[in-house]
Image (cartoon, helix red, strand yellow):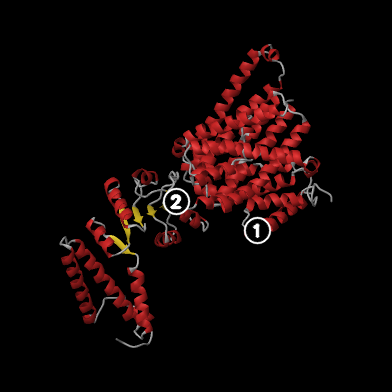
Amino acid sequence: MEHGNLLFDAFIYLCAAVVSVPIAKRLGLGSVLGYLVAGVLIGPFVLGFVGDQTDVMHFAEFGVVMMLFLVGLELKPSLLWKMRGPIVGTGGLQVLLSTAAITLFGMYLGLIWQQALAIGMVLALSSTAIVLQSLQEKGLMKTSAGQSAFAVLLFQDIAVIPMLAILPLLAVSSPELLVNSNSTHLGETGWIQGLVVVGVIAAIIFGGKYLMNPIFGFIAKSKLREIFTASALLLVIGVALAMQAIGLSPALGTFIAGVVLADSDFRHELESNIEPFKGLLLGLFFISVGAGIDFALLFAEPLVVIGLTAALIIGKFLVLFVLAKSNKLAKPDAWLFSVALAQGGEFAFVLFAFASTSGVLPTGLIGLLTLVVATSMLLTPLMLIVNEKYISPRFATHKKEHRDADVIDEENPIIVIGFGRFGQSVGRLLLANNISATVLDHDASQIEMVKKFGFKVYYGEGESAELLHSAGADTAKAIVVAVDDVDSSLNIVHMVQKHFPHLKILVRAINRLHAVELHRLGVNDIERETMASGAELGAKALVALGWQSNIAYRKSRLFKKHDDKSVMELAAYNGDENEYISKANEAKRLLEETLKQDTHWPHEADEHAWEKPGKLK
């Protein structure tokens, strides 16, 4: 079939995505694997609908660029500074140890050290696109494993810069050639290049901090959404081209721009305008990776390809697992972290091509290694599924195992602690009214469950003042304590009153005694978890017995009002247990008499609008 028709190729790509991705999602395989399989099917080695993917890959890589811009928008500079330890420490060790391990393995197979080192550097990198997309899709980016994986990927993107500088040097077979070269000229060129790099990065930071807000404000006044979208794309593509021009990673440049703009007034508008393009281009990138797999070489050398792919994945997994355990990640997080980053990365395609033009690696070896990288990327979504379904559940019983609290990167006017059935009702009501809340819970399995339904929940113990500080309690207006344990609830209230006295405290009470204790602490906004629903159902029971709806509703409200009043009175009483019980029984008797004597209850003028014919009691 003739290729080269842009509209025809676009039609094929879109058809492949529309058919494969929904099927993959329905089967629980994830969108990334769906895109990769679609690429394999339409590629030159299966159906042959599309040809060489080199040009498409260059275009599709902008999906990775836009993804890192959006990631940057989610990270305020202060949060990024807090992550400097994992980025430099964990990320640096991963690149160093993986490079060393792969280099030694290459030399064991007979490669000279320059070639082995070049391959080690390139294969030490992982796929930013596949890892971030897969973790975001599963709601795992805010977990300890997700944050650690992101830190490593960010360092890897930075490490591409020195790798581009080192690779040409590895083509020099004799040290004398390097010594006898024009070192003065090289030094001058290096200084100039360094100044240009610093200048461009400084311009990105300065422009993002001081120029973009007024520019976007001026554009927003035109009230033309398409112009704002064009401006957002212009920003991303402009930064990417500037970084390319000085030989740096475009993805790193747009990430820096995103971080600088994280505090911008137009952050949310930028996200909403860039997101659709990011999704489409990332999908195109995954399809092009699948279509570019050289099945002819795979069938010609199946054992070699399978063996090298297995060696790459297992070797990187072991390095990553050691790092995860040294950082005290819990076993489920350690497995997820190690499995997620065990593949080769998309930068391998660029660096291998550069190594070829620099004379470091022969073309035949590059073809084989490119196939190994693509195969490892194809296997990653499958490995994540295996980890999710068969490995992680084995650690589900270890609920008491230590786990660090998630990194919280947002501040909202209200904080909700506890996201069980009660907390979810509160959170859903707030969300339905467009009120953003920072939600915390200490049950990892509960968090993973609710994340499947699109809720953003952070792992952490609500009794920690440090955690609440990072969750924005200093600037929040209110806190909802919806945990299902009385002692934990009281401890949280004590801590909030001590460290954040400005916060309005609203608490779920498990029972009457819990409500009494909360009143004694001075908490007035209390809702017993069964009182309101029990009174509501009791009113419906009265209607079922023939009562008029408005009268039944009035009786339930009066009951709840007087019972709440009795709880407050009990809270003020400090007698012994027998006298306490006597006081409670007296309150019960007074409540019954009040309900019998009730003949009028102030209510809205239109209350009778919802009455139904029935028996008047």
State the image quarter where residue 428 is shown: bottom left
Residue 508 appears in the picture as rendered:
yes
Q: Residue at x 58, y 23 (%)?
A: 194
**Identity, as a three-letter code, of the amino acid under mark 1:** Pro
For disc 1, the marked residue is: 22
Q: Mark 2 vs mark 1: which is more N-terminal?
A: 1
* Residue 315 place in picture, x, y as percent: 62, 36
In the picture shown, does residue 446 fall above or below 170? below
Q: Which residue is mark 2?
A: 399
C-alpha span from label 2 to label 1: 34 Å
Point 76% across, 32% down: residue: 365
In the rendered view, tell whether residue 48 sits above or below residue 260.
below
Q: For this view, does 292 lie left or right of residue 204?
A: right
- Residue 571 position by quadrant: bottom left
Q: Position of residue 173 (x, y in %)?
A: 72, 18
Q: Nearer the viewer, residue 571 or 399?
A: 399
User: Counting other residues with Cα less than 10 Å from the Cα at mark 1, is it few (<14), some (14-19), or many (20 or more)?
Assistant: some
Could you tell me residue 335's position as x and y percent?
55, 44
- Residue 471 as seen in the image, left or right of residue 143: left
The reply to whether residue 345 is in sight is no
SS class, disc 1: helix
Q: Residue placed at 61% from the left, 51% from the top?
A: 386
Q: Amino acid at mark 2?
A: Lys
- Other residues around mark 2 within 10 Å, as few (<14) / some (14–19) / many (≥20): few
- Report whether 17 appears left or right of 402: right
From the image, state whether disc 2 or disc 1 is nearer to you: 2
In this picture, is 246 found above or below 72? above
